[in-house]
Every structure is written in structure tokens, then in C-alpha cells.
Amino acid sequence: MLIDYQKVNIYQQDNLILKDVDFKVDEGEFIYIIGKVGSGKSSLLKTFYCELDIINDEAEKVEVLGRDLKILKRKGIPALRKEMGIIFQDFQLLHDRTVYSNLKFVLKATDWKDKQEIDQRIDDVLNAVGMIEKKRSMPHELSGGEQQRIAIARALLNQPKIIIADEPTGNLDPETATNIVNLLKDITLQGTAVVMSTHNIPMLDRFPGIVYRCKDAEINDVTSEYNKLKVSEEED
């Protein structure tokens, strides 16, 4: 089990955002988290990589990649994050350097030292997302979809066990968004799990997965509701 939350409460400062969270992720799973803005989707994702702390000690289980988050020390967080890929809606590329330099920066920061190995890994991930020809481009020379592909390549660098994606298609046109979700879905075929928050409800029908809904400070598995496309006003 890559993520195992049992009866976890999630707070923003003193505000209870989600209560009694039961949430599990296993290898190769493709998981959507849906819900209105402010329902707790991003807060939940942030707890996985310790951007938001779990501050209650009453949870039955709070494990991510084998670590108990209730007792994980701050110095242990970089090693945890190294086993993850994190993708943001706004890409968060470094705009003063090329695609190659963006990816090299991450590898250097995670203790890669051999230049030949670094170059090979960068080529590997760029080929995986169909962007090898953009290796020497600057981010501003790329479309939104191309920048998001680079962000996915960056997330793949350290061969993560799980990818956390917060609204990865939120700034993209429908065709590009479809291509990005298709790419993320393909990644799960290699055993990497993907957890993504989204407002793009039609994607749930096009690319089926496990579906959790955040609503009224609770999160529930609603996968059975989305075996067929079902768009309701609450997700619009």
C-alpha cells in the first residue's frame, strides 16, 4: 500500500477541512479526487508530501510510502518526496533556464552526480512524454500543454512510486487536457500510481479510474457513480 489513511482529520490552521478520512492508494492505481473549490482536494494532496502537516494524533493510520506521518521528522521529508512526482496546475518551471536545465536542476538537487547518467535520464523522461525535441527550448517558447508535459517529465525523473497531480489540466484546452490525462493514465501501466484532483468530470468517463469526492468536510469513494458519465451541478 502506497498511501493508507484511516480516520484522519485534516486541518488548515484551526479549521477542520476533512474529517475521518479513509483513503488508500496501491501500485498502478489511477485515482481522481473531485469536489467543489474549497472542499479539501488540494489540502488532502498536500498532506501526502508534507506541505500540510497532520496535526491530530487520533488517526488510526497515516502512512505514505511506508512512513508514519505522525512521527516523521522534518529531515525525513526530502527522502519521502524523492519517491514521489508532484505536478502542479501552473507547471512551476524555472523560466530562466532551458528544459534540459530545469530537469538537470532537479536531478542535481536529488544527489545525481554522473553527467552521463543525468543526460541519459533526461533523455529518457523527455522521450516518455514526447518532448525530446524541446530539450533546449526555454519554457516561454512552449505552449501550456508542452509545459505540462515537461512538468510530467520532471515528476518522472526519480522513477516515483506515485505521482500527485493537483488540477494538472486546469489551464489547458480540452484537446490538450485529454492528451495529458491519457499520458498520466499510460504511466500507471508501469506500476506508478497517479492521484489527481480535477474539475474535468468528462475525463472520468473517458479514462476510468477510482473516484473520491470531497463534500461537506468528508471524502467518499464514489467510483460506482462514474461507471458512466455523470455530470451534476455540484461539480460544474
Image: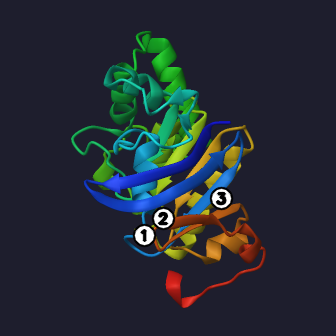
Identified by mark 3, the residue type is Asn
**Residues under labels 3 and 2: Cα distance?**
11 Å
Q: Badge 2, how many Cα within 10 Å: few under 14, some, many 20+? A: many
Which quadrant of the figure has residue 31? bottom right
Which label sits on residue 169?
Answer: 2
**Residues under labels 1 and 3: Cα distance?**
26 Å
Q: Nearer the viewer, residue 54 or 78?
A: 54
Relative to 200, does residue 100 appear above or below in the rendering? Answer: above
Residue 185 appears in view: yes
Which quadrant of the figure has residue 2? top right
**Which residue is denoted by mark 3 in the rendering?**
182
In this figure, which colouring scheme has been used for the structure? rainbow
Give percent across and percent down for residue 16. 36, 60
Q: For the residues carrying marks 1 and 2, which lies nearer the camera in this image?
A: 1
Q: Badge 3, how many Cα within 10 Å: few under 14, some, many 20+? A: some
Where does the N terminus fall, quadrant-wise? top right
Label 2 residue SS: loop
Label 1 residue SS: loop
Identified by mark 2, the residue type is Thr
Relative to 3, does residue 68 appear above or below in the rendering? Answer: above
- The residue that appears at 41% across and 26% down in the rendered structure is 72
| N-term mark: 1 or 3 | 1
Report whether 168 appears left or right of 55. right
| N-term mark: 3 or 2 | 2
Give percent across and percent down for residue 140. 29, 54
| N-term mark: 1 or 2 | 1
**Which residue is denoted by mark 1 in the rendering?**
39
Label 3 residue SS: helix
- The residue that appears at 34% across and 57% down in the rendered structure is 90
Residue 148 appears in view: no
Q: Nearer the viewer, residue 151 or 69?
A: 69
Q: For the residues carrying marks 1 and 3, which lies nearer the camera in this image?
A: 1
